[in-house]
Amino acid sequence: MRQLKLFFIGLLCLSLWSHYAIAQPSARTEGYWSIGAQLNAFNYFGDLNPLHQYTGTRIDFTRPNFSINVSRKLNHRWHLRGALGYGRLKGDDYNPNSLKNLNDNDRIGRYGRNLSFRNDVIELSFVAQYDIFKSTGRFYRRRYINPYLFAGIALAYHNPKARVAADYNGPEAGDYVALRPLSTEGQGLPGYAKKYSLFQPAIPIGAGVKFRLTDRLDFGVEMGFRILFTDHIDDVSGRYAFIEDLRTQVGPLSAKMADRSAERFAVNTGDDRFAGVDPKVLSLVGGITNQYPINPDNLTNGGVVTVPGFERRAGYGAYGTVRGNGNRKGSNGFNQNDLYLVTGFHLNYILTTRRHPRYKVN
């Protein structure tokens, strides 16, 4: 609720600012409307792909993003742009290259956890764009090259899903299923956090450069982050729920999707996760067991329960232990929410139909 309040306050401020800017045009600068389309690369950073390993982002998880936009030039530097976009985010703990460095505990930990997701995101955004170089006069007198900065507000609809293991004993085997209804971390159950919303506010921020191709057509290159107020774009955030709560109150599929550490085959590649793995790695992630601690506050003395048909690696799936990074804070002191990166190209066409002569003929 607090994030939504901030979103609507930001929307109100941006609306008031744009009204003021339009009401105070430069006497020497034409305001005009333009429409455009954008083709982007879509990349996710979060629990399954930490931001600090940006240079190690897997290219095969980059997905296209498409958007259309309408913009208004307000004065000699400022533009206001509204856009509607769609793209798919994807992430997977399993990476065949994760185990090359046995000292990389972060990657080894994600290898053992073995969670994955995909998420189709629809985003509505409003941003203010600031041109580094001012352009005055009519639209056809704008600069040929102009870098710019932008920031604004957005609202994203998302719905994280994951593929069920092919050997799962149920009709969902091999299919993608929505994760929110499965309450994989107990969300919505008594004693757990409430369910996360599928509508999330975001802050777009970034930079680009545009090139004037013709009097009416601009080509641009742009990169921007979407700073989110949620850690559930990937459905991974807090702590493991008690498996018996999931199994009895939600269903067996919930328990299976909450902890996938014991699955032998990677769902997105079909690779055998245990074949040829250094025994040192397997010892780090723990052996397979079907016993689950039942007291998160006293894991060593709280007792265990054996759940037939469900297995986990000893370092994962225990009630109350960390599943994601939502309960931890980064070096900046803030919770480590997810974010995504939009990088791409756009074409914009100026709609102004009037054209005054460049010079007066007597």
Image (spheres, grey):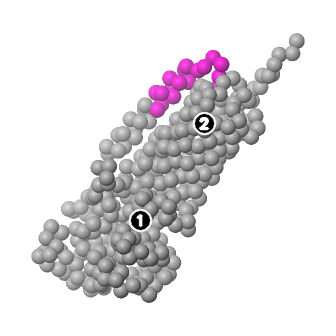
Question: Looking at the image, which residue sits at the far right?
Answer: 362
Task: Pinpoint residue 360: horizontal percent, then vertical percent.
Answer: 83, 16
Q: Quadrant of the N terminus?
A: top left
* Lower sequence index among marks 1 and 2: 1
Residue 260 to residue 62: above or below: below
Task: Pinpoint residue 287: horizontal percent, then vertical percent.
Answer: 29, 84
Label 2: state its secondary structure: strand
**The residue under label 2 is which amino acid type?**
Ser
Q: Residue at x 59, y 59 (%)?
A: 64
Q: Nearer the viewer, residue 179 or 233?
A: 233
Task: Pinpoint residue 137: horizontal percent, then vertical percent.
Answer: 69, 23
Quarter residue 309 falls in? bottom left
155 vs 350, left or right, is left
Whether residue 64 is visible: yes
The residue carrying mark 1 is 48
Asked if the magenta segment contains residue 28, the reply would be yes
Q: Nearer the viewer, residue 344 or 259?
A: 344
Label 1: state its secondary structure: loop
39 vs 4, left or right, is right
Quarter residue 6 falls in? top left
- Determine which of the numbered discs, if any, sits on residue 71 in the image: 2
Q: Nearer the viewer, residue 46 or 16?
A: 46
Q: Residue at x 60, y 19 (%)?
A: 26
Residue 332 to residue 21: above or below: below
**The residue under label 1 is which amino acid type?**
Leu
Question: Looking at the image, which residue sits at the far top?
Answer: 362
Marks 1 and 2, how far apart in space?
Answer: 35 Å
